[in-house]
Amino acid sequence: MTTKSKQSQRDKSPFHTSRANDWCAGCGDFGILHSLDKILTQMDLSADEVAVFGGIGCSGKTPYYLASYGIHTLHGRVLPFASGAKLANPALTVIAVGGDGDGLSIGAGHLVGSGRRNVDLTYIIFDNGVYGLTKGQASPTLRIGEQTKAMPEPSLLEQTNPIAVGLASGFTWIGRGYAYDTRQLGELIEQAIRHPGSSMLVVLQPCPTYNELHNKEWYGGKDMDTGKPRLYSLQDEDYDPLIPADSAPAMREGKMLQCLQRAYEWGQRIPLGVFYQDLSRPQLSDMLTMRQTGGHVAAPAIQPICDAQGNSLVRLDSVFDTLRV
Ligand code: SF4
Ligand code: MG
């Protein structure tokens, strides 16, 4: 498809906005944005059925470029916003986006907490190895000894592996895509959205402005020993990520070990695809419903606030009674 026809397809999307985009030319963010836009449209979702929350960083601007509900939130705090929105209005398709610096450094505590809750949302990490918005400092996913163009010296810090952290935190769907392979990325976004629980999709996102080490040419390279492409799909191999709903705990341990092994494969060969999917864990919303005495209590967005005559059902006077000293 030509650039012109891609643009015309995007113009017809219900998520299209004419807001000016200030990402650098060639940035991998465009591949993620276009894949997201295309898949949401193909899933027949309308703009008012989707909420996109952004962290802080270049990727955090994504909510401006999609005409859905959404907020550009606080640094490292995108997941609490997204979780709250989903619990308040379960009918929404909720997507959180943020960079590797945002999610794995200042936001690491919220990332761990979100995995534990298993709220039905999709978290997309734009992984470029740098803090692009603040001019290219090393981010938590840059490896020890690596030095990109804005760094005066090589990194002294060990890498944080986003897939291993996501797994240890309890995310029940974990995948990885590549920003310039929009066909596979779109499929992964759809699977992540359809998974009933917390999904973490890491996207290898070249930053042509500040990370000249992991650029399009490097990702598109080959294993020097075997001549096989550096990027490969787990689903093209005999790799099964699924833990069915009624599985024994021992199966989860085996699948976690399998996922960890692939999470640390990097360099000559880099796996993409679905690393892990656990359908055996309940969602937080189901557990909250079970805990309510007398059955289901409606989520705030669908609780009635007035009767048929338009009279408020909210007893503000009783609130003031409680507050009076
Ligand atoms: Fe993209 Fe990097 Fe430019 Fe940010 S600095 S918009 S990540 S190319
Ligand atoms: Mg980054």
Image (cartoon, rainbow, N blue to C red):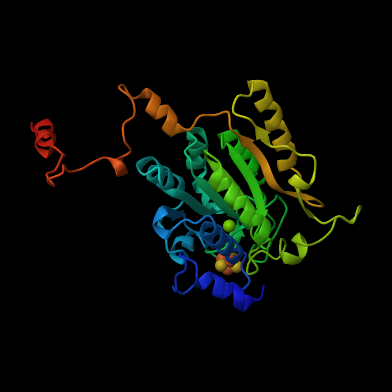
Residue 223 sits above or below residue 253 on the image: below
Residue 299 sits above or below residue 19 on the image: above
Which residue appears at 52% of the width and 52% of the height? 102
Q: Position of residue 6 (x, y in %)?
A: 60, 72
Residue 99 sits above or below residue 247 on the image: below
Front residue of this view, candidates 190 and 164 = 190
Quadrant, the N terminus: bottom right
- Is residue 118 at least partly visible in the picture? yes
Left of 223 or right of it: where is 52? Answer: left
Front residue of this view, candidates 259 and 109 = 259
- Is residue 74 at least partly visible in the picture? no
Q: Residue furthest right?
A: 225
Front residue of this view, candidates 159 and 262 = 262
| Marker count (numbered) | 0
Quadrant, the C terminus: top left
Front residue of this view, candidates 289 and 218 = 289
Q: Position of residue 19 (x, y in %)?
A: 44, 73
Q: Choose top left, top right, bottom left or bottom right for residue 290.
A: top left
Which residue appears at 31% of the width and 31% of the height? 297
Q: Residue furthest bottom?
A: 4
Split into quadrants, the picture shows ligand 1 in the one at bottom right
Q: Position of residue 254 (x, y in %)?
A: 71, 27
Which residue appears at 57% of the width and 45% of the height? 200
Q: Choose top left, top right, bottom left or bottom right for residue 288.
A: top left
Q: Position of residue 144 (x, y in %)?
A: 70, 49
Left of 8 or right of it: where is 237? Answer: right
Q: Choose top left, top right, bottom left or bottom right for residue 52.
A: bottom left
